[in-house]
Image (cartoon, rainbow, N blue to C red):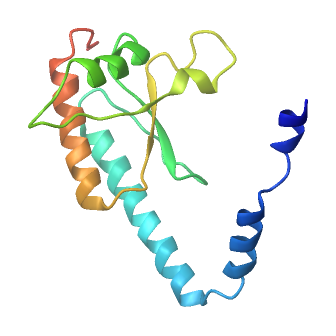
Amino acid sequence: MKWCQARLSPPLIGQIIAEASLDTPEEYMLEVYNEYVERRKFLIDGLNRIPGCYSPIPMGAFYTVAKLPVDDADKFCAWCLSEFEYEGQTVMMALASGFYTTPGLGKNGVRIAYVLKKEDLAKALTVLAKALEAYPGRVI
């Protein structure tokens, strides 16, 4: 019970950081905001160019939930980590199925964060596209 209640309290370091952010110049905040808007656009456009993929534009997060042309995203993600590589790289994604309480929802979805630089996102999109081409459970 103590652990459950403790997670409801903001950590001290988080409070210190939040207070310090009040003194951050507005120009910096605008620069960071614009960078993440650009990363979001880059990732969403890239995902939607991959045949069979679809991602809506998220409105308030650092990630998107993308639908992939796969039989089971959980299996696809595990396959990417255990059996697939392209030019020595693979991709790691969060499973979307864990974000739904209704059975079956999110079965072909993954959560992808856009916290990386655009150059790294471009590499990840290339690797994802190659993985989807090679995946034995691809759905057309």
Residue 83 is situated, as x and y percent measured from the top left of the image, at 21, 18
Residue 104 is situated, as x and y percent measured from the top left of the image, at 57, 10
Residue at the image point whose x is 16% and y is 23% from the top: 133
Residue 12 is situated, as x and y percent measured from the top left of the image, at 78, 63
Q: Quadrant of residue 82?
A: top left
Residue at the image point whose x is 70% and y is 81% from the top: 20
Instruction: Tell me the quadrant of the picture where the N terminus can be found.
Output: top right
Residue at the image point whose x is 53% and y is 89% from the top: 27
Q: Is 20 located above or below residue 77 in the figure?
A: below
Q: Nearer the viewer, residue 46 or 14?
A: 14
Q: Nearer the viewer, residue 120 or 42?
A: 120
Q: Nearer the viewer, residue 23 or 97?
A: 23
Residue at the image point whose x is 8% and y is 37% from the top: 87
Numbered disc total: 0
Q: Is residue 16 left or right of residue 50?
A: right
Instruction: Tell me the quadrant of the picture where the C terminus can be found.
Output: top left
Q: Is residue 7 left or right of residue 127?
A: right
Q: Is 30 located above or below residue 90 in the figure?
A: below
Q: Residue furthest left?
A: 87
Residue 126 is situated, as x and y percent measured from the top left of the image, at 18, 41
Q: Nearer the viewer, residue 89 or 61?
A: 89
Q: Quadrant of residue 50?
A: top left
Q: Residue furthest front?
A: 2
Q: Is residue 85 left or right of residue 58?
A: left
Q: Is 66 located above or below residue 140 in the figure?
A: below
